[in-house]
Image (cartoon, rainbow, N blue to C red):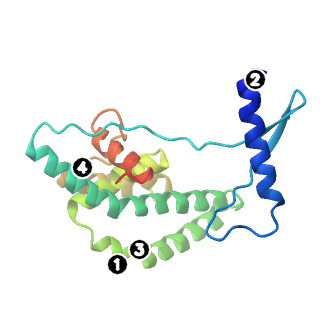
Amino acid sequence: MKPVYAVILFLVLFSAKAVSQEVKPITGTKQIFLETKVVHGDTLPHITLHEISVVPKWKFRSKKEYRKYSRLVRNIKKTLPYARLAARKLHEIDNHMQTLKTDKERKAYLKEAEKKLFADFEQPLRHLTVSQGLLLIRLIDRETGDTSYNLIKEYKSGFAAFFWQSVARLFGSNLKADYDPDGDEKMIEHIIILLDNGML
């Protein structure tokens, strides 16, 4: 071990040991206790660093794009929690469905789960604008890894999926479209990364 590193290591270990041996902490200071690992006979402080995403600022090509971005930020803040909640609920439903043995039990459980979801979310989702509703469809795809069309088909029926796809087409959306973070949804993905990192 190089002498400079040995001195730095000694200071770090000594200061950590000194803090842990104090009986009365100094008022107004924060104590941090480090985990240690023994490597080749040396005791080293061990700190797990969390991943940090480095995201460049979005380069706006026009005022119109800036307004679109600002609107998206507001809409994503409103709809992303619902999309993530939907993904959690679907995961819970899938897990419970695997414990059921007959089709009759599965249908009864799905009917009950649908009633409960409807009761819990009908009112807040009715207050979404059309653009927020369309965004929510895309975010559900992002969070679940499956298109809304496939989810409706799996949990309801092929006819229900066809019906809602027809309705979505009237509003200029497509329930079969995959979420594309490098294509059409690049701006959405950028905003979500910033939100998740507390940068917006």
In the image shown, does 68 or 153 lie closer to the viewer?
A: 68
Point out the frontmost of discs 2 and 1.
2
Q: Is residue 75 left or right of residue 7?
A: left
**Of pointers 3 and 4, the one earlier in the residue sequence:** 3
Q: Is residue 190 left or right of residue 169?
A: right
Q: Is residue 52 visible?
A: yes
Amino acid at dot 3: Phe
Asked if labels 3 and 1 touch by Cβ distance under 8 angstroms, the answer is: yes
How many numbered marks, from 0 up?
4
Amino acid at dot 1: Gln
The x, y position of residue 7, in whole percent, is 75, 32
The x, y position of residue 196, in whole percent, is 44, 52
The residue wearing badge 4 is 173
Determine whether the residue tagged by mark 1 lies in a helix, strand or loop. Answer: helix
Residue 59 higher or lower than 91, as above or below: above
Q: Is residue 95 left or right of residue 185?
A: right
Asked if labels 4 and 2 touch by Cβ distance under 8 angstroms, the answer is: no
The mark found on residue 3 in the picture is: 2
Disc 2 from disc 1: Cα separation = 67 Å
The residue wearing badge 1 is 123
The x, y position of residue 64, in whole percent, is 9, 46
The residue wearing badge 3 is 121
Point out the frontmost of discs 3 and 4.
3
Residue 37 higher or lower than 94, as above or below: above
In the image shown, does 105 or 54 lie closer to the viewer?
A: 54
Amino acid at dot 4: Ser
